[in-house]
Image (cartoon, rainbow, N blue to C red):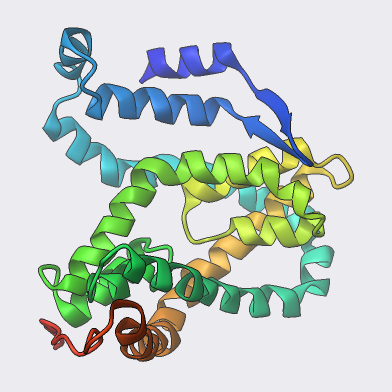
Amino acid sequence: MLVIVIIAEAIGTIEFPIGPGTVVLLPLLFAVVIGVTISYSVLGKYIKTLRQFVDKDVSILSSPLLIIALMPLGVKYGTQVGPSFESLVNSGAAFILQELGNLGTIFLALPLALLLGLKREAIGSAVSIAREPTLGVVTDKYGIESPEGRGVLGTYLTGTVLGTIFFGLLGGFATATGLDPHALAMACGTGSASMMTACSASLATAVESVPDDQILSFAATSNLLTGITGLYVVLFIGLPLINFLYETLAPLIRGGSGGNETSEEGSN
């Protein structure tokens, strides 16, 4: 891990323009790419040699330890929230309303999932960004072996491997939208500390009109609120909504009685 950090820091931050936006590649992204390459790549005997140092047991142990490792970062963001407290209070209504924006995932992802051929797996995979609260809700309601459970687990694993990279790129390029940097900072708070960190850091690098600490504090506050409210939004709004849309859209997209499959629901 220390070697990966040294290599990533040696590469540093790379910025280059694409159209109206700027792509910001942070050392965090390079570290993730190197780590994923060592763990999953099939580049031959050299990677196999490296994998001897990162076996399956180490990978399993590192997953919960990631949360512990991110706690000091959370404390750092907390110290940045204080100086921006007045700005955060003035944006209170926006913070609450933007949580409903997480439901936009459904309207974007569900039709695409159905077009790709997913059945009830689309419900679990498209109901949200599928971090820990959503994973818990869906697996408790339907069971991990159900189509919905397989769907949410697939999105969760994809986000674990690629989410930090994607959000790091998205944060820098988001300035091309012309939206207020504070709104973009709120959008970085999706309920995942690693994704929020990558997104807000690259956004802060790309935006010069707003202090870095304000960008990071808005993102951290949004991330905290998403973690608190996200479970209830998924449980009481997201799942009923996506089930209704699934029953409506599946026959139209796939034809026949596409929305009438029975779920292997395992609700208590």
Where is the C terminus found, in terms of image quarters?
bottom left
Residue drawn at x 74%, y 57% as measured from the top left? 82
Task: Locate residue 248, reporting x and y percent.
Answer: 37, 90
Task: Locate residue 49, reporting x and y percent.
Answer: 16, 10
Residue drawn at x 42%, y 88% as measured from the top left? 241
Whether residue 133 can be seen here = no
Lateral position of residue 115 relative to residue 104, left or right = left
Lateral position of residue 243 relative to residue 60, left or right = right
- Comparing 80 with 112, the one in front is 112
The answer to whether residue 178 is above or below residue 173 is below
- Comparing 90 with 246, the one in front is 246
The answer to whether residue 26 is above or below residue 130 is above
Task: Locate residue 233, reporting x and y percent.
Answer: 46, 82
Residue drawn at x 21%, y 34% as measured from the top left? 59
Task: Locate residue 209, reporting x and y percent.
Answer: 89, 45
Indicate the quadrant where residue 1 lies. Answer: top left
Whether residue 88 can be seen here = yes
Indicate the quadrant where residue 134 lies. Answer: bottom left
Lateral position of residue 258 relative to residue 98, left or right = left
Q: Seen from this angle, which residue lies furthest right?
A: 209
Residue drawn at x 52%, y 30% as measured from the top left? 28
